[in-house]
Image (cartoon, helix red, strand yellow):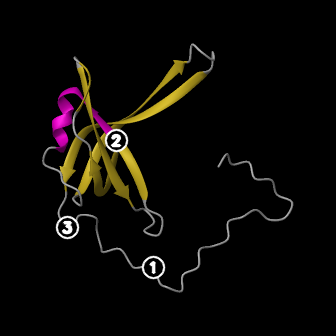
Amino acid sequence: MDIKGKVHEISEVMEVTSSFRKRELVIEYAENPSYPEFIKFEAIQDRVSLMDKCKVGDMVEVSFNLKGRAWNNPKTGKTDYFNTLQIWRVTTLGANAMGAPMEETPSSFTPPDISNAPGEEDDLPF
């Protein structure tokens, strides 16, 4: 999978154990410029160096794999699930690499009302 965005934050290399290290990258992804998303990626082991040439504000394309795992909490007996976006390539893009400049949101813009109609039930968990 690939995604393009602006580097928002780059962590230092974290030595989790003597044989495992990781580094995190947060990019600002603005599919809708009015509501940017901040997405955290992780590089592990020898791939932590992929971010060495990146700096905050750079436009990048991140290639990653979506990983997921289950963990059984021994205290509660409950199973929790975790997702990770693992980086395998980071490419720094030129200033115009995101395509045409994004349009400014007009000051008179009013977001559409997406609330439920009377009598409809909201089944979203957030």
Q: Position of residue 68 (x, y in %)?
A: 46, 28
Report the residue at 21% width, 59% height from top. Answer: 58
46 magenta-colored = yes
Marks 2/3: CA–CA distance: 22 Å
Residue 75 quadrant: top right
Q: Read off the magenta span.
A: 41-51
| Lower position in the chain sequence, tag 3 or tag 1 | 3
Report the residue at 33% width, 49% height from top. Answer: 26
Q: Position of residue 8 (x, y in %)?
A: 30, 55
Using the image, determine if residue 49 lies above or below residue 18.
below
Circle 2/circle 3 CB separation < 8 Å: no
Pointer 3 residue:
95
Kind of residue sitting beneath label 2: Phe
Kind of residue sitting beneath label 3: Ala
Q: Position of residue 3 (x, y in %)?
A: 34, 51
Of all residues, the one furthest to the front in this rendering is 75
Q: Nearer the viewer, mark 2 or mark 3?
A: 2
Q: Is residue 47 left or right of residue 76?
A: left
